[in-house]
Amino acid sequence: MADADPPSGRPRRRSEPALPLPECVALVLQGGGALGAYQAGVYQALDQRGIAIDRIAGISIGAVNAAIIAGNPPERRVAALREFWSLVTSWLPSFPALDDPQTRQTLHEWSAGFVALMGVPGFFAPRPFPPALARAGTPDALSFYDSRALARTLDRLIDWDLLNDGPVHVSVGVVEIESGNFRYFSNRRERLDARHIMASGALPPGLPPVEIDGRLYWDGGLVSNTPLQEVMDTQSSPMLVFQVDLFPAEGRVPRTMEDVIARAKEIRFSSRTRQVGDQLLRLRKERELIRRALAKLPAELCGDPDIAALKALAEEHPVNIVHLIHRPNAWEGDARDYEFSTRTMREHWAAGHGAVMQSVNASALLARNILNGETAAFDLTRS
């Protein structure tokens, strides 16, 4: 896959991981459609650097990548990701490598328009008639595209028994339509199948809701597009988190209406990324303050039930969060999440791969934090 591919076509694995690893290493994957190839590149680089994943939480395309990773043995994961991303970008022709921004923007918009008209192979296809002509309440009336092809793709690429019974803890976020409540499906609480992954990516009005146990679900990104909270809420040991954001929270001030649409999408789907992380780190500092105060209490108070309850609330495990953020090129507009061209996919894959390599190569502070049991957040790829 572009520069990210090892010459042999197989992942280069290290005998020792590139970092001192805590008991749990987690991967947090945002939704973002075609941008999800960036996450595949991230995983390939982690695999090459010997960093094994124990925990994955995903939303939308992040849920698809999570299921492919956890639903394959380690030696097959990168190949399965490559197969998926090659399939969904296989319809668009490869254009000449013209790199001036105006030409790339034109090809980018043309490719996205082709997807809107024709769909994506192995993923979704346009319905033959407009939803307004369909009978109310039917899937045809509730979305512009039919996503049944994705179910077949997932069933072909994923060993569901391995995903459900294997060592990787997987969670995918969804929204229950009637209540509006956000929830996670987890392979530690229920057996996941293609429906759960498709529900996490059922973004209206493009894709139809997915029924599970009599309830209808939409894409979890409608409420929260970053599943960091789920990973933190289920933490039971020291943890290293690679948070892969497909939409940057920070961005340029718009100059055109297209810029306005693109920037609004970034803000909407970055989904309080920084707010959640900052809040978690602030709570940890407050708990540290409580622990220091409790340590100063006289011994005769240690058996007090209220003091014991306070100690329990203040207990926590260290966590280090590494932000890996896809920062768009100047020619990528508001259509970037549905521009499924081969060239752009390869570039996104290579960018994710490069972000990990850059972070690991600049990881002395991160390594020290892990060894010392400290908590912090890092963006080691910021230029």
Image (tube, rainbow, N blue to C red):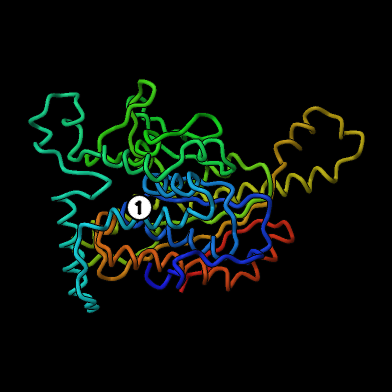
Dot 1, crowdedness within 10 Å: few (<14), some or many (≥20)?
many
Q: Viewer-proximal residue, 342 or 158?
A: 158
Residue drawn at point x = 79 percent, y = 45 percent: 293
Q: Is residue 362 left or right of residue 248?
A: right
Which residue is farthest top? 214
Relative height, residue 260 to residue 229 (above, below): below
Instruction: Give the x, y percent position of residue 105.
Output: 20, 69
Q: Viewer-proximal residue, 329 or 280?
A: 329
Relative height, residue 134 to residue 364 (above, below): above
Disc 1 is placed on an element classified as: helix
Which residue is farthest front? 8
Q: Quadrant of residue 134?
A: top left
Instruction: Give the x, y percent position of residue 351.
Output: 41, 68
Instruction: Give the x, y percent position of residue 226.
Output: 44, 48
Instruction: Give the x, y percent position of residue 329.
Output: 31, 69
Q: Which residue is mark 1?
A: 84
Residue drawn at point x = 27 percent, y = 57 percent: 89
Q: Is residue 117 left or right of residue 20?
A: left
Which residue is farthest right? 300
Relative height, residue 142 to residue 321 (above, below): above
Q: Identify residue type, mark 1.
A: Phe
Residue drawn at point x = 33 percent, y = 35 percent: 218
Residue drawn at point x = 57 percent, y = 56 percent: 321
Q: Quadrant of residue 360?
A: bottom right
Quarter of the rendering occupied by the N terminus: bottom left
